[in-house]
Image (tube, rainbow, N blue to C red):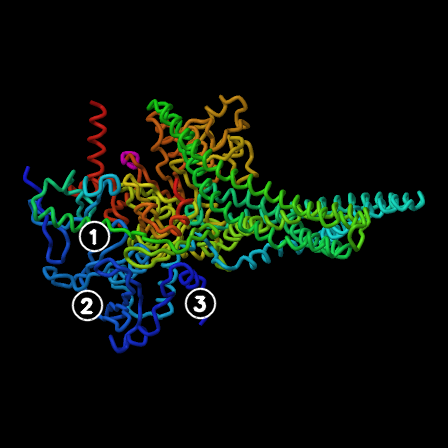
């Protein structure tokens, strides 16, 4: 059976089996009789923490532990019914499991050790055991669970697998398809200009020989004429080649950029949380730029250099094979020296890059945090730290320069030696002391051709580096293009023109990393027009619940229903236009206030924008700005205060007139006065809609019809503000009392 | 205040004697690299700190032994003794090494450089979060040292 991408990643990178070995599968019947294979994982450390192949296999009735040793395998079978709990100890670089039986006063049934690499797979088994989940399954599902859990970190770091450099180049070249004509014209121009480059030295030689043999002036002028023609044609073909290829390269880069950006819009939040913003931006900008360089010039340059070398070699051998050999024989050695030099440079350049990375991390750490540096009066210390890194960089780059500045003059000297050798062997033949004689013209032609050898050799020498850079950029771009949206959309999706706003959560579970459950079996129902407050300590899962509600992520288990329809079946465009969100950190785009309020509603009338701003208590401060609604706010709205930014985002939500409104800590970052204004604005906003609000200050949720209290991903309490306060040992009561106490302390 | 006492529960877990009886604890070393074996936070299964030890010296002999065993177990890493290959790939640096625990292949991100620790050793974290230590450049064979040299600051 062909291996899946995940299995190939495992085999390529982890040197551990990509699936449960067949030998164990065969023996399973002997070990546990007839039962389904549910899940399996590798526990890769023995009791002494040495690497060892051991398998933990979960069946529908039993859990098996099998240790693979050269001569035999050790087996241990534990009925699932005998397992009570698993005690996990997280070590600094691994885990220990003690699988406990029903009698907890007895030693564990078995102790298992494994590295962090195996954790996801083993966690699947633990979850299955704890949830006492379905005990029959398809063994292919077990294979998939194992391979996807194990390969996920590798897949996250790199979407594709190694060894397919050619495939990447071919894929890149497919982008040239729409520009076949340009490729042909540019390519042919390049071939012609290469051929034409060989003409002037030959004509110059003939001219010199003509002068020496006192050929008629007319004949000599003919040579000059040919020379002129060759130069004009050469210039013409240079222009054709450069312009065609540059325009085409730019268009290809444009196509790739458009495709990447459009694809980015389809990707889920999971992708954006996994990748750094800078990395995504550089893929759309500098990587596509690098590809432009490669497509426009790189491919042709390399091809031409090879062509030029072949052309030069042939012409030289045809002119005089003895002298020709002098020039062509050293070529393989020179190319080899490029390879050796390249490797050496790569080694010391990596060191320099390491130092450079230290330098940039000092910069990226201190410049954004310059206020802290100044507040703690650490300018001198930071300057010294930078100086130290800068000195290190200087030292490393000096090493780099030492190597290349020695190599290139040495190479030039080699060429000089070759030229001298040409003189040495040619001189007796020029003076007639040796045979066969050679004309001065031929000799000059030789010297001119010899001077042309260096450049194509250099280009070929740098080919590997250029190719690697281009492939690396292409890989990074294709990684985005190959990433499938984590939130797949069905073909026939349901569009609900106007939502009622009923929301149901049914046994919803969710995990960001597939390991740690953030939402644990939550069920509740919200009626249309109801306002519900979500409360709980930090990390309880409140924001995650909201992200599931707007389908930034899909639940790992259970389902979410909107007006009785499963959220997965709804058309996201139609659904999200009816959901409004006011977040703790409102995001404003670079642009005018008008554009920000009307974001997503380009046809909103000025009157409706003002009305929304008035309702959000934003109109007053907007009018005081120099250009009022047309004032351009800086990047992320930095020119406005936190409260002002928040009121603009509320105005945006009001303008959208959503049926479901989500308020995520909308007033937590502002002072009391601003909070009052925002609260007034929110009061305008919430009437007649289903509202889900998260608030740090519990008193602000008094208006809520109901409160849902979350703790450690579980729904632990629900009821009205008053009802929950009556529960003496309740989580909400505890949180509320704590806040009241803090408030009183502050008042005192 | 009485000395904290550590025992082993029947299931093998380390436990702290509290006024309510023994409670299973996990050790969280606050400074695993700069002050190994000191400043230890002992936490229960809920993650709450039951006891903070600046040094194991405050414990009685038996408890200290148990603690040291647990520290040895919980702070163990892969000690790299030689590097066979170190290749750069797209977005990844691929290592094939021999460790004190056996041969191992692992990957790091390209900008995940080995971290110099105060004792002169180097710490490497792979894509999965497993930790690898190289005790010093001098203790590596010449080939391994040559491969590793460019990666250290």
Give the chain letter at badge 1: B
From the viewer's perspective, is A587 left or right of A287? left
Q: Residues within 10 Å of mark 1 (few under 14, many from 20)?
A: some
Residue B131 position, x and y percent, is: 31, 50
Mark 3 → mark 1, Cα distance in angstroms: 37 Å
Q: Between residues B61 and A622, which one lies in front from this camera angle?
A: B61
| Residue A510, above or below A225 | below
Residue A122 position, x and y percent, is: 29, 60
| Residue A658, above or below A319 | above
Residue under circle 1?
B73
Residue under circle 2?
A81
Q: Between residues A126 and B130, which one lies in front from this camera angle?
A: B130
Residue under circle 3?
A3
Count of number-bearing discs: 3
- Residue A706 inside the magenta-drawn segment: no
Q: Nearer the viewer, mark 3 or mark 1?
A: 1
Give the chain letter at badge 3: A
Give the chain letter at badge 2: A
The first of marks 2 and 3 along the sequence is 3
Contact, CB < 8 Å: mark 1 with mark 2?
no
For residue A259, say whether it is visible: no
Q: Which residues are magenta?
A: A698-702
Which image quarter is the C terminus of chain A in?
A: top left
Q: Residues within 10 Å of mark 2 (few under 14, many from 20)?
A: few
């Amino acid at each position: 059976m062909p291996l899946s991408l995940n299995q190939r990643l495992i085999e390529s990178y982890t040197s551990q089996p990509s699936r449960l070995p067949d030998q164990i599968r065969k023996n399973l019947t002997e070990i546990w009789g007839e039962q389904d294979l549910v899940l399996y994982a590798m526990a890769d450390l023995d009791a002494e923490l040495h690497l060892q192949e051991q398998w933990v296999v979960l069946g529908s009735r039993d859990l098996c532990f099998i240790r693979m040793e050269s001569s035999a395998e050790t087996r241990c079978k534990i009925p699932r019914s005998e397992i009570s709990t698993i005690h996990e100890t997280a070590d600094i670089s691994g885990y220990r499991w003690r699988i406990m039986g029903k009698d907890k006063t007895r030693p564990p049934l078995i102790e298992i050790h494994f590295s962090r690499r195996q954790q996801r797979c083993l966690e699947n088994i633990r979850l299955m055991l704890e949830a006492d989940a379905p005990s029959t399954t398809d063994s292919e599902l077990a294979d998939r669970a194992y391979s996807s859990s194990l390969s996920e970190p590798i897949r996250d770091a790199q979407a594709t697998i190694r060894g397919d450099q050619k495939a990447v180049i071919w894929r890149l070249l497919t982008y040239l398809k729409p520009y076949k004509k340009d490729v042909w014209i540019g390519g042919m121009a390049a071939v012609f200009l290469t051929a034409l480059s060989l003409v002037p030295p030959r004509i110059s030689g003939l001219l010199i020989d003509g002068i020496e043999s006192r050929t008629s002036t007319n004949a000599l002028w003919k040579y000059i004429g040919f020379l002129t023609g060759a130069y004009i044609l050469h210039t013409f073909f240079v222009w054709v080649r450069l312009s065609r290829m540059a325009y085409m390269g730019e268009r290809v880069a444009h196509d790739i950029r458009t495709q990447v950006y459009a694809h980015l819009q389809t990707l889920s939040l999971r992708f954006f949380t996994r990748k750094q913003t800078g990395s995504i931006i550089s893929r759309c900008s500098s990587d596509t730029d690098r590809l432009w360089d490669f497509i426009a010039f790189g491919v042709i340059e390399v091809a031409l250099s090879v062509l030029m070398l072949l052309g030069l070699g042939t012409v030289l051998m045809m002119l005089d094979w003895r002298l020709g050999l002098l020039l062509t024989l050293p070529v393989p050695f020179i190319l080899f020296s490029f390879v050796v030099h390249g490797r050496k440079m790569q080694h010391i350049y990596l060191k320099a890059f390491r130092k450079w990375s230290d330098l940039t991390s000092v910069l990226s750490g201190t410049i954004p945090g310059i206020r802290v540096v100044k507040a703690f009066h650490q300018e001198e210390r930071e300057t010294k730290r930078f100086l130290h890194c800068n000195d290190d960089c200087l030292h490393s780059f000096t090493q780099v320069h030492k190597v290349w500045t020695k190599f290139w003059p040495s190479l030039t000297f080699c060429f000089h030696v070759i030229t001298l050798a040409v003189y040495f062997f040619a001189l007796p033949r020029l003076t007639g002391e040796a045979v066969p004689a050679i004309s001065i013209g031929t000799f000059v032609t030789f010297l001119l051709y010899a001077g042309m050898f260096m450049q194509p050799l250099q280009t070929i020498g740098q080919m590997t580096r250029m190719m690697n850079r281009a492939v690396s950029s292409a890989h990074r771009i294709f990684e985005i293009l190959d990433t499938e949206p984590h939130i797949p959309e069905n073909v026939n999706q349901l569009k609900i023109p106007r939502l009622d706003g009923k929301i149901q959560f049914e046994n919803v579970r969710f995990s960001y990393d597939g390991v740690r459950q953030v939402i644990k079996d939550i069920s509740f129902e919200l009626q249309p027009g109801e306002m519900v407050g979500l409360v709980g300590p930090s990390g309880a899962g409140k924001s995650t619940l909201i992200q599931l509600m707007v389908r930034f992520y899909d639940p790992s288990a259970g389902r979410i229903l909107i007006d009785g329809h499963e959220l997965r079946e709804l058309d996201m465009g139609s659904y999200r236009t009816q959901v409004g969100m006011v977040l703790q950190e409102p995001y404003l785009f670079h642009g005018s206030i008008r554009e920000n309020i009307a974001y997503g509603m380009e046809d909103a009338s000025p009157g409706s924008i003002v009305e929304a701003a008035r309702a959000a208590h934003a109109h007053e401060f907007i009018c005081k700005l120099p250009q009022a609604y047309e004032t351009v706010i800086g990047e992320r709205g930095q020119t406005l205060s936190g409260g002002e930014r928040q009121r603009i985002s509320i105005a945006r939500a009001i303008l959208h007139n959503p049926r479901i409104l989500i308020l995520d800590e909308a007033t937590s970052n502002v002072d009391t006065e601003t909070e009052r204004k925002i609260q007034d604005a929110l009061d305008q906003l919430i009437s007649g809609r289903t509202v889900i609000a998260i608030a740090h200050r519990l008193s602000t949720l008094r208006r809520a019809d109901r409160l849902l209290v979350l703790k450690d991903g579980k729904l632990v309490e629900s009821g009205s503000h008053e009802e929950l306060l009556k529960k003496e040992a309740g989580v909400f009561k505890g949180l509320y009392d704590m806040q009241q106490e803090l408030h009183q302390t502050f008042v005192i | 205040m009485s000395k904290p006492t550590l025992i082993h529960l029947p299931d093998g877990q380390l436990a702290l004697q509290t006024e309510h009886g023994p409670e299973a604890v996990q050790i969280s070393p606050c400074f695993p690299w700069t002050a190994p074996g000191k400043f230890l936070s002992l936490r229960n299964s809920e993650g709450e700190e039951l006891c903070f030890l600046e040094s194991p010296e405050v414990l009685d002999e038996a408890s200290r032994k148990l603690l040291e065993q647990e520290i040895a177990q919980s702070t163990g890493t892969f000690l790299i003794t030689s590097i066979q290959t170190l290749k750069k790939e797209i977005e990844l640096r691929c290592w094939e090494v021999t460790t004190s625990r056996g041969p191992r292949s692992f990957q790091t991100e390209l900008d995940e450089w080995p971290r110099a620790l105060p004792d002169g050793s180097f710490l490497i974290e792979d894509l999965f979060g497993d930790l690898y230590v190289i005790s010093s450049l001098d203790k590596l064979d010449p080939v391994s040292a040559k491969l590793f040299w460019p990666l250290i600051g």
